[in-house]
Image (cartoon, grey):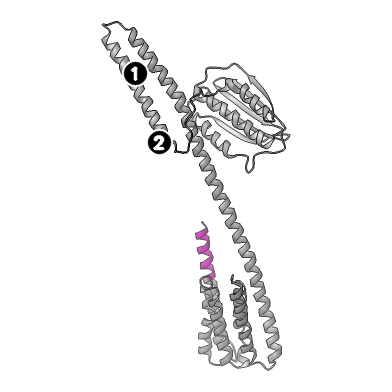
Amino acid sequence: MRAVLDGIKQRAFEALVLTFAVASVVEAIAAQHVQHRAIVALLALGWTLPFVLRRRYPLWAPLVVLAFLAAFGLISPERSISSLTMPFVAALVAAVSLGLVGDRRQSIAGWAGVIATAAVISSKSGNGYSDFFWTTLILTLAWFFGSALGSRTEQARELTERVEAAERARATAAEHATAEERARIARELHDIVAHSVSVMVVQASGVRRLLKDEQHREREALLSVEQIGRQALTEMRRMLGVMRSGEETPAALAPQPGLQHLDRLIAQVEEAGLAVTLRVEGDRPDISPGVDLSAYRIVQEGLTNALKHAKGAHAEVVVRYIDSSVELEIADDGKGGPTGDGMGHGLVGMRERVALYGGTIESGPRAGGGFVLRAQLPVEGHA
């Protein structure tokens, strides 16, 4: 988008310069008291068209314009100079352009060129010193205007680059946090699924041993279940090894937590300095292990954010079991809140968990002050 806008601006500038060149040539041909009209018309192209190259040659393009203006002053008598307006306009534009040059030494050298050009043109005037003074004053003011405009433009450009760099860093950090959360979810789901498959294998093995000798077909089917289950466990461990980098810690062997462990989590948070109230509404249905773990992690993240941004305040955790879903609400009454748009990197990861099970999550300022996080998960975890 920026490249397109820059292209449009450049084409508009080129059209403006071309219009200026045509007007200068027409004035040179049509104005009264102009001698050597053909030469002056050619010089008019010289003091206008170089502006097209000003972006590529910010110093030399205006200096070329000044050179053609000085040549015009040398070959033209006073009446020819005073009868034309476009040369003075070109001198003003050249002075502003030289003030815009970023290198201060080059800009000052350009200003010296402006003064020299004014001296050449004023030398043909009967009021040489007076004309030189006023011409120099006007062109110097134009140069100062260009210098001030250049400084503001440079500051704006640097600020834009800083904002863009900050946005890129923020996007990169969010992507990194999302990737880390996805890897963490994969490791936790590996533990859950591995435990379930292991139970299936053990039960199939136990049933196989209870079969009678003549039940060959049933024995072969159960043996096949055992073998496939063990192969699945092996492949899952390999998959997890591919996802894990060498710097990551191995997955914990302890059972993964769930909503039944919230009392222990809240006790830890209260020891860290945040008072928490837990309220459970409704009867707990059968919840799949993955959903149970994700719900626990969401509460954990919400309390972690409250502890970080509202330490010393009060937080409330509400767990509602409604129909075939579990609703979570973590709210605090602190004065602080997550920075930015209210969605820190931890909450970005929570979005991944909720999306995995087809739930919803939202967060933002709380009415009356504080911050609130709400999430809903289907108990069966179907996306």
Q: Nearer the viewer, residue 378 or 223?
A: 223
Q: Which residue is mark 2?
A: 242
SS category of the residue bearing label 1 = helix
Question: Can residue 89 be spotted in the picture?
Answer: no
Cα gap from disc 2 to disc 1, whole angstroms:
25 Å
Amino acid type for the residue under numbered disc 1: Glu
Which mark is drawn over residue 226?
1
Quarter of the rendering containing residue 296: top right
Quarter of the rendering containing residue 141: bottom right
* 252 over 281 or under it: above or below: below
Q: Is residue 5 magenta?
A: yes
Measuring from the top left, give residue 182's x and y in whole percent: 49, 35
Task: Give the left or right position of residue 129, taking residue 54 as reference.
Answer: right
Q: What's the magenta region?
A: 1-13
Question: Can residue 58 be spotted in the picture?
Answer: yes
Label 2 Cα crowd, 10 Å radius (few <14 / some 14-19 / many 20+): few
Q: Nearer the viewer, residue 247 or 174?
A: 247
**Predominant SS along the magenta part:** helix
Quarter of the rendering containing residue 266: top right
Label 1 Cα crowd, 10 Å radius (few <14 / some 14-19 / many 20+): many
